[in-house]
Structure formats: C-alpha cells, structure tokens
Amino acid sequence: MVTLRRVFSLLLALITAGIASYLAFGYFLSDGLQWLDLARVVLLAISVAWLAWGGMLALNGLFNSRREIEWQEAPEPPTARTAVLVPVYNEDPAKTFSHVAAMAQSLSRAGAGTQFDFVILSDTTDSRIAVAEEFWLGRLKEEIGDTCRLFYRRRNTNPGKKAGNIADFIRTSGALYDYLIMLDADSLMEGATMIEMVRRMEVDPELGLLQTLPKVTRARSFFGRAIQFSASYYSPVYASGVAELQGREGPFWGHNAITRTRAFAQSCGLPTLPGRPPFGGHILSHDFVEAALLARNGWKVRIDPDLRGSYEEGPDNIIDYAKRDRRWCQGNLQHGRIIAAPGLKLWSRFTFAQGIMAYIAAPLWALFLVASIAAPAIKVHPDYFPVPGLPVFPRVEHANALALLTGVFGLLIGPKILIVIDGALSGRNRRFGGTIRCLLDMFVEIACTSILAPIMMLFQSRAVCQVMTGADAGWPAANREAGRVTLSEAWAASWWIVVVGLVTVGAAYRFAPDYLFWVMLVAGPQIAAPLLISASSLTGSKFGQLKLFATPEELTPTPVMQAQQAILTRWRSGAEMQPVHTVLEVPKLREPSKIRAKR
C-alpha cells in the first residue's frame, strides 16, 4: 500500500510537470525555436515537479485517516528508564533551563518523574555563558528539587557539535537508559507526551525512532507569527502526508523525538567525511543521516503527527531565519556525498534528494527568470515570408501562458485552500477562531509569503552558491529571542538584494519590456527588501489583540507552556546572578558492552 501511494504521488507530480512543459513549449516556441527556450522549459519542468510534489504531500495528508486520531494518556507511568537530552551551545541558560524546569515538573505531576533523567549537554565556548550556565544550573536544581534527576556536562572541545555531544553521552552513559528523548535548547514538551512516546516505543519493539511534530510557539513579530500559524495549521496535514508515504523509513528532524538507545548506538555512528568543509568534515544535517542509518539496520523510523504537546520556537525575523537556513543549506547539500552510500533504503535516498532540492529550487527559479529576460534579447528576427506569397505570422499562444500561470498559482495556494475546507468540515478550524478567521489568516499569510518569497529566493540562492564555491558557514549560535531589526541593520544585510532587484528591472526594461510587469512582482520586493525585513520584524500587542495568526497554543496555553513562562519571568525578575560551582556530572557507564537488547 505504501509503495502504491509513493508511485501514484510521484506519477501525479511528473504528469503535472509534463503538462506545464507542454504549455510552456506552446508559448515559448510560438515565435521560433532557440536553445534558451529549451532551457526555460527544463527549468520550469523541474520547478513545477517540485511544487506538485508538495501538493501531493498535502493530498496524502488530507486523506490520512490517522491524522486526527485521539490518544489516551497511559493509566500507569512507564517503568523503562529514559534520558531527556538537552544540547546547548552558547544559549541563554535562563531561557533553556526554564524549559527543563517546566518539563520536569510536568513529568512529576504525571507521576513519572523518577523514570526520566534530564541531561544538559553543553558545547558552550563562551566563558561568560559557561559561568552563567553554572549559576542557572543551581537555580534549576532548586526549582525542580527531587522531582527528576538532573545532570550537566560541558565539553572542553566540541567535535561533531550536537551529534558528537550526543554520541559521547551514549558511549559513556547510554547503557543506563532504555530510551533517549532528544531535544533542542528551545524545545518544550508536556510530561504526558513524553510518557506516551515511551509507551509507543514499548508497544512496538521494532520501532527505533519516533518523531513528533513540534508546534512553533512564543512568536512575537509579524514574520514569526506567520511561521507559527503555518506550523500549527498547515504542517500537521503535510506531516500526515509524510507519514502516509514513509513506510518504515520516516524522518528525523533532530529534536522532539525519542529513540531506542540500543538501536541508535548500534546504527548511528557518523563518519567524518574526507576533505574540507563545506562538503567534508563532520556531517551538519546529521538527523537525516541518522534516520537513514536506523532504517538501513532494519529499525522502524516513524512520525506520529497526532502526538500533541510538542513545541519549539522559531526565528522572529528574516535575517535570523536566513542565518539558520544557510546552515541547513550546507548540511542538505552535503548529503550529495552520502546519497549513494551502500545499503541505504531507496526512500532514504529519495529523502536526501528532497532535502537537496529544497535549496536547489531557489536558484532554479532565479535562472528561469534570467533566461526569460534574456530570451527576447537573443531572439532571431522571424521570417514572415518562408515561401513566396502571403506572409505567415507567428501565433502567440496567450491561452497557454494563462493556463500555465493559473496552474503554478494553483499549486502554490491550492493545498492551503483545501486545508481550510477540510478544517471547516472536520471542525478543526474552531480551535483557530473559526473558518472566517482561518480564511483571513490564510490570505494574509499567502500575501506575506508571496511578497517575501523573492527575498528568500535570493538568500537561498546565495547560500547555494556559497556552498558550491567552498564557503563554510560553520555552526553559529542561535539567537532565539532576537528583537526588531532596524532599517540600518536590514540594509546592511540586504543591500545586495536591492542591487539585484534594480539590475533585474533594468535588464527587463532593456531586453524584455513585455515582461516588465511580471518582473516587477519579483524585483519590486527585492528593491524594498530592507523596508520589508525591518517591517516584518515588528513586535507588539496589536497582533494578539487582532488575533492575527492566532493558534490554539496561543489562545489556550498548555500547562507546560504556562509553567515555563512563569518560571522564566520569576527567574529574570530575581536577584543578580552569582556563579554556582557545584556542577553535577553525567553518570559514567561501567561496561559499554552491557547495553540491553530489547528487540
């Protein structure tokens, strides 16, 4: 059944691309054939196939009967031992540790605190932040008391970054635990959710990793709230589509997931790729690779979108989003060296290809735009008298162009419209303020996405070019509470986008004046990039008052969200920080060979 769904979805995406190619041929070749027209058709076909594949994920999700399944909390807490791993890297420790405190208290209220240990794995390189970590570790210990055991370790050097830190923990302490819940510094989960994750691992002994769908929370800016709404409203449907197509080779996104310790230790040793970064060295996007290695060893990797109570935070402005995206781009393109590794499942290889295409799509669209502007400039003057007699004028296929434009637009917004309709029929829209509110949010989100898309296209295209030319982005620390971007900051980050927009308009005016209106839809936002970046980072209470992009988690915060916010507010309003030197160490493994087999 899974194979049939995969084949059917891929065929529909390819058929859609074929129809787009046919329409493009009719329009581009109406006044004669040249090599640039063929290049435009190929670029368009690849891009449309990518858009159509996204539509197929949404359709599979809409027809997934398990998407809205309700699960009952387990009557008894689990007996298995689970470590909750919290990797940190130059983060604000007060913010991160408040998440840990809230999760520990949530587990304690559920009666399972003694079965879960929290392990903070620090790769912090800034000595001032390291001192702050020690202080807030003491506050955290006071906050949670004896509800859960707490351990902390800071590495003096950090080879392998997050993946290396987790691997070190598994080598030294992994045998003490049946399962590992892997988080990010901004992750937050309900205790009942973690208990349910353990229960599902216990029920299926072949399950190697179970991924939840994190909802974005605590967004303050217009840009951040648009991402938050998309993650809460659209993403469950797309994730359900992934769940339908994945079979046993599901995704791992690096956090808010649980893994069987034995399976991970057995399967997920990551190599250091030969050569220098960006394509050599340590694997950046390690999560995709770890999922593929688990599947290669016969373990199930699954995503369960119905698992509620899983949260994360996202960037609140375009600049921080682009910085994070640059690292993801390098990690995904690095998978080009892994995609042919022996023994991998076919779907795992396809997942790598999807990740690469997610970033290659941006420069492909940019090349299509360049080719469309350049085509009229090199067009051969048509011969109206190929044979003696009456002239033969070229036929301009305006109907083809209109159909092509409508089709591409439909691929972009059609799935979102279907999700709103499905939400109205299923009653899901009520949790977001009703169908009218969802329609309004959808149209505003589409408008916002459409305006910002040309800017993001250039950020991603630059990232791809940097990686392909050997530039290494490294692993910069995340600024999870970045405020408003001033106009001067926006200009410093995007002046080159303005230049590209102006050059594009000038080239269109000179070589393709008939396309100038359509080119302005792309170049206009690029010229206004500094203003748009700054304006979209605005924060304020008006968004909440208008309930723009409101989500269920915002309208009715869950207990763990309320607890985390209360703890952080109390901590930050307290006394000045004083260093704490009593640092707990992670327990050491006595014999690495004694990892229990539970398969």
Image (spheres, rainbow, N blue to C red):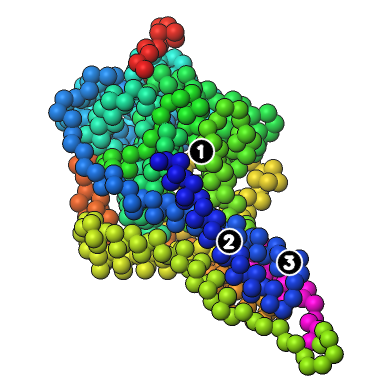
Report the amino acid beneath label 2. Answer: Gly
Above-or-below relation of 267 to 548 = above
Q: Quadrant of the C terminus?
A: top left
Q: Nearer the viewer, residue 100 or 550?
A: 550
Tell me which numbered mark, 3 or 1, is placed earlier along the sequence.
3
The residue mark sitting in front, 3 or 1, is 1
Spatial separation of the CA atoms under disc 2 and disc 3:
18 Å
Residue 424: within the magenta? no
Tell me where residue 400 appears, x and y as whole percent.
Answer: 58, 75
Residue at the image point whose x is 36% and y is 46% from the top:
240
Q: How many marks?
A: 3
The residue tagged 2 is: 18
Tell me which numbered mark, 1 or 2, is placed earlier along the sequence.
2
Residue at the image point whose x is 28% and y is 29% from the top:
200
Report the amino acid beneath label 3. Answer: Leu
The residue tagged 1 is: 347
Spatial separation of the CA atoms under disc 1 and disc 2:
23 Å
Tell me which numbered mark, 2 or 3, is placed earlier along the sequence.
2
Q: Which residues are magenta?
A: 365-384
The residue tagged 3 is: 36
